[in-house]
């Protein structure tokens, strides 16, 4: 593969409260993001003719709907650059899994092309562009574990333990839009403080809605939850559990029934995207 390669890591939501809804329909959240040591990889090759082109196939995502392509085109338009890019995406993170794969891909695209196109845009400007693409994009640009509020864009750094996580993917795609439109979604959870979360507070308000609509996720939660504490990340459908060691997580992974896929990854307070930015600079 040619070009400059950049990481697009996964995240987990350690809790997720929906505390209200704005007049425009967007939900007000409280959550904590932590990165995982598992990632998509994206190769960028700068073009001089202004063409933005995805050169790889991604199952179920046509190029015109891909956040990678949309992010590149948005950055190109807003910056006025005459440059383009060939973009090759290697997907390792499941689509519709709640791990932020599409948002992470978009964030990496904005950060990488800002440097490769020598645009010199600030991180705040990239964050503003990213927010127009998706509520999770800002935290991936920010690059640190964070307490998030608003629609997910108001970020406060938090220092967390970095345990090992087992992440399990059920055989279904969960629509974020469907979950947030659900009439039975709790939208008035009382706000909590960071200290409340650190003392063990918090749940995922989306989990009950996902359970009711996706029996595959409910079965996975029941199976894993009977052995360890398990939780849906984001709007699902991936389910995760934390472990003190890689060995313990791997042992549980080996017990998984064949109908589910899973992986083990370390929790990370610093995104590898920040290290890649430093390398490029």
Image (cartoon, grey):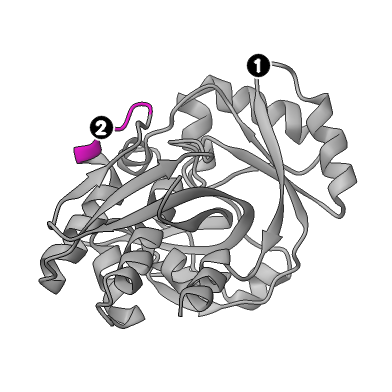
Q: Nearer the viewer, residue 241 or 86?
A: 86
**Residue at 30% across, 72% down:** 114
Q: Position of residue 260 (x, y in %)?
A: 65, 23
Q: Is residue 90 left or right of residue 265?
A: left
Is 260 situated above or below 266? above
Main SS of residues in magenta: loop
In magenta, the rendered stretch is 59-64
Q: Is residue 109 left or right of residue 221?
A: left
Q: Nearer the viewer, residue 2 or 268?
A: 2
Q: Nearer the viewer, residue 79 or 154?
A: 79
Viewer can see residue 243 = yes
Q: What SS does tag 1 mark? A: loop
- When asked about the image quadrant of residue 224, the answer is top right
Is 256 situated above or below 198? above
Q: Circle 1 is placed at which residue position?
A: 259
Q: Which mark is residue 62?
A: 2
Residue 63 belongs to the span the image colors magenta: yes
* Circle 2 or circle 1, nearest the eye: 2
């Amino acid at each position: 593969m040619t070009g400059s390669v950049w990481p697009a890591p996964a995240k987990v939501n350690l809790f997720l409260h929906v505390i209200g809804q704005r007049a425009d329909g967007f939900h007000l959240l409280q959550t904590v993001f932590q990165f995982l040591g598992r990632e998509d990889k994206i190769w960028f090759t700068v073009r001089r003719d202004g063409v933005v082109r995805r050169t790889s196939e991604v199952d179920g995502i046509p190029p015109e709907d891909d956040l990678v392509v949309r992010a590149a085109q948005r950055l190109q338009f807003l910056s006025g650059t005459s440059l383009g890019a060939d973009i090759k995406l290697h997907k390792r993170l499941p689509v519709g899994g709640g791990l932020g794969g599409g948002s992470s891909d978009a964030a990496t695209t904005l950060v990488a092309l800002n440097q490769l196109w020598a645009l010199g845009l600030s991180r705040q400007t990239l964050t503003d562009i990213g927010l127009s693409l998706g509520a999770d994009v800002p935290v991936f640009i920010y690059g640190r574990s964070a307490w998030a509020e608003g629609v997910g864009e108001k970020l406060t750094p938090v220092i967390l333990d970095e345990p090992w996580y087992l992440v399990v993917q059920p055989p279904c795609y969960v629509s974020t839009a469907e979950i947030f439109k659900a009439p039975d979604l709790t939208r008035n959870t009382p706000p909590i403080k960071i200290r409340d979360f650190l003392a063990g507070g918090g749940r995922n308000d989306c989990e009950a809605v996902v359970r009711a609509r996706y029996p595959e996720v409910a079965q996975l939660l029941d199976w894993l939850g009977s052995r360890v504490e398990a939780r849906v990340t984001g709007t699902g459908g991936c389910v995760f559990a934390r472990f003190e060691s890689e060995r313990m997580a791997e042992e549980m992974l080996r017990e998984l029934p064949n109908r589910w896929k899973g992986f083990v990854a370390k929790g990370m307070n610093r995104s590898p995207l920040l290290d890649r930015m430093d390398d490029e600079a």
